[in-house]
Image (cartoon, rainbow, N blue to C red):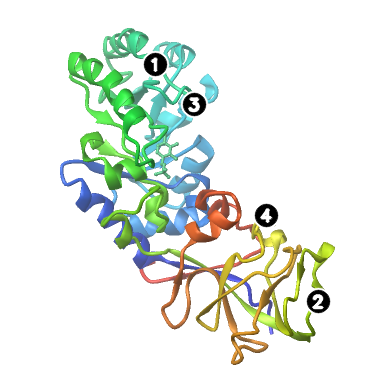
Amino acid sequence: MARPLIADIDLDALRHNYLLARSLAPDSQAVAVLKADAYGHGLVACARALAGLAPAFAVACLEEAEVLREAGITAPVVLLEGIFEASELERVEALGLWMAVHSDWQVEALLAYRPARPIPVWLKVDSGMHRLGFAPERAEAAWQRLAAAPGHACDLHLMSHFATADLVDRHYLERQMGRLASLAERLGAPLCLANSPATLACPEAHGAWNRPGVMLYGSDPLEAANAASRRLLPVMTLRSAIIAVRDLPAGEPVGYGGRWTTPRPSRIGVVAAGYGDGYDRHAVDGTPVLVAGRRTAIAGKVSMDMLTVDLTDIPEADIGSEVVLWGRAAGGEVLSVDEVARHCDTISYTLLTGVLPRVPRRYHGHS
Ligand SMILES: *Cc1c(COP(=O)(O)O)cnc(C)c1O
C-alpha cells in the first residue's frame, strides 16, 4: 500500500467559488488570483479549470506567468508586484502580460522601454497598507506620466490593497477608501481594490475589477462569516489514513516531549501526515481532525511524518480508516481549513500554501 497522504483538489468547488465571487459583484470583473501555485492547489490545473470563466489571472511574478503561458493559458495575466528588474519587460511584452506599477523606478523602466504593443498597467496606490504603491498625493503624477506615453500603458487602472477588509470594524477600510475616492474621481480611473474579504463583505469596494484569492479555494477570510462566505466550498481535502493503533492506560505520555498525556485509558491512532508534509507543527492538542467522518483531535506533538489522534470515542476507527486533516470526508462531513488554522495560531493561507511537494495532488471534477 502506498503512503495514504494525498491532497484531493475539487475543481468543481473552485469553479463554484469563482462563480460566487462573480455573482457577489455583478458589475465587476474578477481576476482569479493564482499566485503561490494557486495557494498550493496547483497553478496550471486551477487555471485550466477557470479558463472558461475568469477573464484574467493574477500571479506574483514573471516566473509564475511563464508557467501559465507554457501550459497554453492565453488569458491576460497580471503581475501583482510588477517587474523586479527592468530586463523583465521584454518577457512581459512577449507574453502579453499586464503589470502593477508601484514604484518610480518601474515607471522609469516602462517609459524607457519601447514596446511594440502596449503593456496594460495597474498603478498601485498605497492607501494605507503601507507596503507597495505610490502615496495618494504622488500617484497622480505617475499616472499622468504613464498616460502621456502612448503605447506604453494604455488601459491604465488604479489598484490598491486593503489591510483590514476581513475585520468587522470598518474604520480603517473606510479610511483607505476615503484616500482613494478623490484621486479616482479626478483621474476617472477604473478601480481594482477588492481582495477576498472585500469581495465577500464590502460591496462599496467593488470596482471595475476585483481580486479574489483565498476565497476561490474555499477559505472564509472574514472575522465574522456572512451569508455569502458560508456558501464557499472547500477545494482541498488533505486526506490520509490511520496506519497504527495503540491502547494505552491512563497517565501515558504520547509523542515527543510527552506534551499530551492520556487522561483515561485511551485508544491512540497514528496518522500518516506530519510537518514534513506541511502539516503545521504548531497544532495544539485539541486541533480537530475527522476520522471515519467523525470529529476528534490531535493528541501529542506533530512529528515529521506522523501525528497522533485520540480514537477513544471512535471505536469503529481502525487501521486504514480515513483521516481528513482539513476538507471534506468521504461521507460529506467538512472540517474547514480556517478552523484548523486557528488551532495552529496561523491563517488558512499558510496551511494551504504550505502543503509540500511530496504530498501528491489528485484532481477531481472539471479538468
Ligand atoms: C494575494 C493578493 C490578493 C488576494 O488576496 P486574498 O486575501 O487571498 O483574496 C489580492 N491582491 C493582491 C495585491 C494580492 O497580493
Image quarter hosting the N terminus: bottom right
Q: Is 89 drawn above or below residue 26 in the view shown? A: above
Instruction: Characterize the local packing of mark 3: few (<14), some (14-19) or many (20 or more) Cα atoms within 10 angstroms.
Output: many
Label 1 and label 3: CA atoms lie apart by: 16 Å
* Residue named by callout 2: 251
Depth check, front residue: 59 or 90: 59
Residue 312, compared with residue 103, is above or below; it is: below
Where is mark 4, residue-wise? 282
Q: Which of disc 1 and disc 4 is earlier in sequence?
A: 1
Which residue is rendered at x = 72% and y = 63% of the image? 302
Residue identifier under label 1: 114
Label 3 lies in ligand 1 vicinity (Cβ under 8 Å): no
Q: Position of residue 329 (x, y in %)?
A: 48, 77
Q: Is residue 324 visible?
A: yes
Q: Give the amino acid at mark 3.
A: Ile
Q: CA distance from mark 2 to mark 4?
A: 23 Å
Disc 2/disc 3 C-alpha distance (Å): 58 Å
Q: Nearer the viewer, residue 366 or 209?
A: 209
Quarter holding the C terminus?
A: bottom left
Q: Amino acid at mark 4?
A: His
Position in image of residue 280 (x %, y %)? 65, 57
Residue for point 44% across, 11% down: 108
On residue 83, which mark appears? 3
Q: Is residue 158 visible?
A: no
The quarter of the displayed image where residue 206 is located: top left
Q: Nearer the viewer, residue 125 or 283?
A: 283
